[in-house]
Amino acid sequence: MKYLNTQSSDFQSELKALLAFETAQDPKVDQVVADICTDVQKRGDAAVIEYTNQFDGTDAQSMQDLMLSQADLKAAFERLPETTQTALQTAAARVESYHRHQKMESWSYTDEDGTLLGQQITPLDRVGIYVPGGKAAYPSSVIMNAMPAHVAGVPEIIMVVPTPKGERNDIVLAAAYVAGVTNVFTIGGAQAVAALAYGTETIPQVDKITGPGNAFVAAAKRRVFGVVGIDMVAGPSEILVIADGTTPAEWVAMDLFSQAEHDEIAQAILISTSQQYLDDVQTAMDKLIEEMPRRDIIEASLGNRGIMILAKDLKDACAVANYIAPEHLELSIADPQEWVTEIRHAGAIFMGPYTSESLGDYCAGPNHVLPTSRTARFSSPLGTYDFQKRSSLIQVSKEGAQKLGKTASILAHGERLTAHARAAELRLQDE
Amino acid sequence: MKYLNTQSSDFQSELKALLAFETAQDPKVDQVVADICTDVQKRGDAAVIEYTNQFDGTDAQSMQDLMLSQADLKAAFERLPETTQTALQTAAARVESYHRHQKMESWSYTDEDGTLLGQQITPLDRVGIYVPGGKAAYPSSVIMNAMPAHVAGVPEIIMVVPTPKGERNDIVLAAAYVAGVTNVFTIGGAQAVAALAYGTETIPQVDKITGPGNAFVAAAKRRVFGVVGIDMVAGPSEILVIADGTTPAEWVAMDLFSQAEHDEIAQAILISTSQQYLDDVQTAMDKLIEEMPRRDIIEASLGNRGIMILAKDLKDACAVANYIAPEHLELSIADPQEWVTEIRHAGAIFMGPYTSESLGDYCAGPNHVLPTSRTARFSSPLGTYDFQKRSSLIQVSKEGAQKLGKTASILAHGERLTAHARAAELRLQDE
């Protein structure tokens, strides 16, 4: 891991260089995706079947071969060991409970003129959840994407998950069962995103697509954005741990590993006010790395992008955190409640020694889909609110129209929009 | 205007064709914008000054010549007639009052194991408001973009507004004064968007950019998205009026005009359950068009994209509205409260005869920045919430870590993420 000191004169520029991550889009990928999207829009099911057979090594004859029913999902759930069934249900129940707190409700009020103002909240009609297949098959991702939609009251949740060579992942399908997914198509890639965005004879058009995917999926989501809503296109995952030395060094070492094991471009950063503690964590990592099956990935990730930072004090450490605006922030300190209000930018804040990021990743309750690459400066975790939307409500009373009409008329004339002014003036009684 | 009947067999396909609007991006515009953005990122102020002099016909020697102080804004306000001053203040106060209702507050709760879960709400640090200059200078747009940021608690609101040939618009600057803008740069185009997104020696980097602009501004916003947040890139403006015949036909005719006068691609649609009423509105339009200074634009807009629809009943009309998901929806009917809950998708809903869209555009309180082109299916009006963000809070208790740790461990092993599992397991006491 790189080593920085906040008191060095070049700290800011060194940190900036280490955080930098090129997210340049590949024009070749964009072109392939554009062609696939156009083709699916034009030829519908036929195109989806062809691309699926081509890319996933399947042999589907019709869309029937690429559909799973509720019974299929239930059967997958029932094939799991009871401990896994319970773990999925526990995680789903906790995620559901937390996300209920996020649900927006309609409101309105009436002003002194009898004019009603408010906001009507409605769920989206139908959403699509993209779930990667193959090696990186994450049931937790199904729960984190589907449950907020379910809590928001979305009546139809369509999941797509590719099954390379026909291989289905029971835990993923069981998670869909537990999280209340309506139906599943075993398709993936840009063709799945296009099918959800435009609709085909068999696949219903959705209003929003969420969920992670590879470069083709990300490019396809960017392309269909506007036709449908999308969640953020995520960058590499990051963790920042602020430690005052009171958490066992092994715990923090493993938390850094849990970030680093995702992939070679994941980023793990530790800030401490104690040089001794930084050394202790390094010693713990040297020992613990031996037992890690994903050792190569962890070493590559920490070697490429890992950072240890010595800070002057916790205030200094929080200032660095606000600059980094990390996806995951652990306040592994004695009094996290005192310091959490200093944090202005972070996706999720894990407080105290017992809150490992991994508890939040799976089952604490909050969402694990979080803003990456400093975007926590302006964006939020995926939540129930992402599957609801607001309509402004205005019902102007006769009396209100008299006062508002005069104001609107003056401003509309100021913008030389005569019809706007006249529409207001026609409602004035003394006209 | 085109004429449709919901009972015709080809109604859906005809409506779809009339709603279609090609938002294809122009690759030439994209290339120009890419070059400008790269140049501003590289050369900062110098590039901004050069492009501004080139595109706006100004003669700025340094950024000093392109900055306005609070005193300049105040002076602009004081030059206005008192009626205009009062109109701006009335509008700003009403918009502020409504947007206070939207402000999100932090919350948390503790579960039975003593684990704290919650959400911390923080405002963005700094935002940029783009305001078009020249002909389409809209003070109402300044209020609608700046006031929600102000209410959210954003400490710095930076406005950019081009001043072609040095011409400043007093009402626009006065609106900035009234809406609490921090400072103003008299720059525009892609160079202004790039300067806000990347920062220059003089112009501070912002976290989000909102506000309307031409094709170059829209392309620049799309380009910097991810580095900073942006609001939606808006399509042409639309209104859908549902009328049962109880509102004077002239009023509705003028409401349709007020949409159509924006530009040739704006869309005005009237649905009524009464053929007679559709005829009456047509007659009223034929008469009222004579007094419209923007007659040419109105006629082009209504000719190109205007639609009159005869519906079977109000339920039928609401179904059409839900398909269209209009930016502006007038429920110009006797009992709008009864029908508003049938509306699932609309940016803003204007209820009853007195609620002309123009009252909402300027001063009723709700925002006039609304989702266009059917995006109300998945998105919301600009609001206070767009200038706040959420951080999840998790503080797992020792007891909670025992239960959650077991669940997380099972699921992490299921995803073959050993470090995730170990981080949870290390917190188990009986280990």
Image (cartoon, coloured by chain):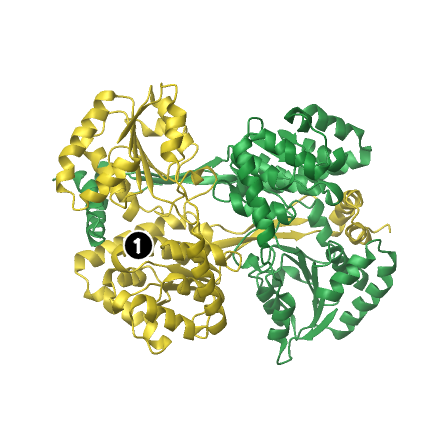
Chain colours: A green, B yellow
Disc 1 crowd rating (10 Å Cα; few below 14, some 14-19, many 20+) is many
Q: Quadrant of the C terminus of chain A?
A: top left
Judged left or right of residue A252, residue B117 is left
Q: Where residue B215 sits: x, y (%)?
A: 38, 54
Residue at the image point whose x is 37% and y is 59% from the top: B130
Judged left or right of residue B404, residue A368 is left
> Quadrant location of residue A265?
bottom right
Along the line of sight, which residue is nearer the eye, A175 or B303?
A: B303
Helix, strand or loop at mark 1: helix
* Amino acid marked by disc 1: Ala
Judged left or right of residue A379, residue A298 is right
> Quadrant location of residue B355?
top left
Q: Where residue B68 sits: x, y (%)?
A: 32, 71
Q: Which chain carries label 1?
A: B
| Residue A166 sits above or below residue A316 on the image | above
Residue at the image point whose x is 74% and y is 47% from the top: B400
Along the line of sight, which residue is nearer the eye, B299 or A393?
A: B299
Q: Where residue B242 sits: x, y (%)?
A: 31, 29
Along the line of sight, which residue is nearer the eye, A164 or B64?
A: A164
Residue at the image point whose x is 28% and y is 67% from the top: B73
> Quadrant location of residue A92?
top right
> Can you identify the residue that label 1 sits on?
B92
Judged left or right of residue B423, residue A99 is left
| Residue A320 sits above or below residue B3 on the image | below
